[in-house]
């Protein structure tokens, strides 16, 4: 087994490198499917190590570290995309240490930190190669926010016969430096919800001669709220976020269509699918009451939540408690955001860790996807140590 002291010493050796990588990726800040400069930077770092890599359409990468000895294959994942959010030059307490160079885009979720921690782990594990058995795959996933890269990346991974996986997400609601690897549901499944109420347009002075879809949509919102409160299984939770409503352009014109959209979030996919069916039924019934009809312009499917494997979670808990200071590994409530890593955990047993960054005194703790979200660089070291130690637990025997 690789000694904890050696892992810590190597991570400390590369800590400045990890921080510099974080700032570089943060400055590049490219959205889904457009991570071209980020990809080029990653390739330059990979080639310095001389590791073989595979480019996966469009901007994902798989890097292979083969020890040359039989053992398990562990896949490590980091997401590389940014968000279409204009960055505030300050965090919650003052000026941030680095800034996006692409106006209107920034890393407002922490993917820059995920990417840099995996780059750091790649450096350390390469140095530890002679003390490991099996294969490590470093996977950089494009387009996590919109799910544009996950399917191609998982398809490319099939030939590698992956045994286990590991991912990590920084979490603004968890205290600085704390880490959670709890078993079971960790992040919510999601389903997009879309409905068009189709009525009959007309003049605003004669609503009796039209069928106003706006009233059908308004009534639907109230009816849906009641149905969800009464018909979701007791003990389960499905949150509904209806966030869009578009109808009409003029005050004296009754529009023929009103469109609504939003999402459901849940930790039980069966309950999520039940909510979708209820959504459709309530929409159709309400539309009929107002002389309209309901149409569903996009498929609505309940995606799986992120569910950590019980055995992998137990192994991670033991390994991280062994190397990190007492009290670092904590239990954490599930997070209602959604993540493409759910598909990894359907394909392979593994762990999705939460790494806390909250330190409001220093300005860290703004909600994810917020203009004032900022990355707490103090936690990079903990994330890199945890990643390396998890690999060593499986491949270091």
Image: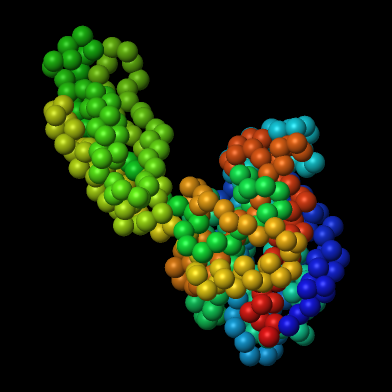
Q: Which quadrant of the figure has residue 172?
A: top right
Q: Which quadrant of the figure has residue 7?
A: bottom right
Residue farthest to the top, as pictured: 205
Q: Which residue is more in the foreground, 182 or 355? A: 182
Image quarter in which the C terminus is found: bottom right
User: How far across and down, in percent of the image, does residue 50 sit?
Assistant: 76, 76
Tell me which residue sits at (71%, 37%) in the image: 360
The answer to whether residue 41 of the structure is visible from this angle is: no
Q: Which residue is more in the foreground, 182 or 256? A: 182
The answer to whether residue 379 of the structure is visible from this angle is: yes
Q: Which quadrant of the figure has residue 253?
A: top left
- 209 versus 47 height, above or below: above
Q: How is the image coloured?
A: rainbow
Left or right of 340? Residue 358 is right
Tell me which residue sits at (30%, 38%) in the image: 229
Tell me which residue sits at (21%, 22%) in the image: 212
Q: Which residue is more in the foreground, 256 or 377? A: 377
User: How far across and down, in percent of the image, does residue 223 sit?
Assistant: 24, 32
User: How far across and down, in percent of the image, does residue 135 sit?
Assistant: 64, 81
- 78 versus 132 height, above or below: above
How many numbered discs?
0
Residue farthest to the front, as pictured: 326
Q: Which residue is more in the foreground, 24 or 370? A: 370
Left or right of 40? Residue 336 is left
Left or right of 169? Residue 42 is right
Tell me which residue sits at (16%, 36%) in the image: 285
Image quarter in which the N terminus is found: bottom right
User: How far across and down, in percent of the image, does residue 36 sit?
Assistant: 65, 55
């Amino acid at each position: 087994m690789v000694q904890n002291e050696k892992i810590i010493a190597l991570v400390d050796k590369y800590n400045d490198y990890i921080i510099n990588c974080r700032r570089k990726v943060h400055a590049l800040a490219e959205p889904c499917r457009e991570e071209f400069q980020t990809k080029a930077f990653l390739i330059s770092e990979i080639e310095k190590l001389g590791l073989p890599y595979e480019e996966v359409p469009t901007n994902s990468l798989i890097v292979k570290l083969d020890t040359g000895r039989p053992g398990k294959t562990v896949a490590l994942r980091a997401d590389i995309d940014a968000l279409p959010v204009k960055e505030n030059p300050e965090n919650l307490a003052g000026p941030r240490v680095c800034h996006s160079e692409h106006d209107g885009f920034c890393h407002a979720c922490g993917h820059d930190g995920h990417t840099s921690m995996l780059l750091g782990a790649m450096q350390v594990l390469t140095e530890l190669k002679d003390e490991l058995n099996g294969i490590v795959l470093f996977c950089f996933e494009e387009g996590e926010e919109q799910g544009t890269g996950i399917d191609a990346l998982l398809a490319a991974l099939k030939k590698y016969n992956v045994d286990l996986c590991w991912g990590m997400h920084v979490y603004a609601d968890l205290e600085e430096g704390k880490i959670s690897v709890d078993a079971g549901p960790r992040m919510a499944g999601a389903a997009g919800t879309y409905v068009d109420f189709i009525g009959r347009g007309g003049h605003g002075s004669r609503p009796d001669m039209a069928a106003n879809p706006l009233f059908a949509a308004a009534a639907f919102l109230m009816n849906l709220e009641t149905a969800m409160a009464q018909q979701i299984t007791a003990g389960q939770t499905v949150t509904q976020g209806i966030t869009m409503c578009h109808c009409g352009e003029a005050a004296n014109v009754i529009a023929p269509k009103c469109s609504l959209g939003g999402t459901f979030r849940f930790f039980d996919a069966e309950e999520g699918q039940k909510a979708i069916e209820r959504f459709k039924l309530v929409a159709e019934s309400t539309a009929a009451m107002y002389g309209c009809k309901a149409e569903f312009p996009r498929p609505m499917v309940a995606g799986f939540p992120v569910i950590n494997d019980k055995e992998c979670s137990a192994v991670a808990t033991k390994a991280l408690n062994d190397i990190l200071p007492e009290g670092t590994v904590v239990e954490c409530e599930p997070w209602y955001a959604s993540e493409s890593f759910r598909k990894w955990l359907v394909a392979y047993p593994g762990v999705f860790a939460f790494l806390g960054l909250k330190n409001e005194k220093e300005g860290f703790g703004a909600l994810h996807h917020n203009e004032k979200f900022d990355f707490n660089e103090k936690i990079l070291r903990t994330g890199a140590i945890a990643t390396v130690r998890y690999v060593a637990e499986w491949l270091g025997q």
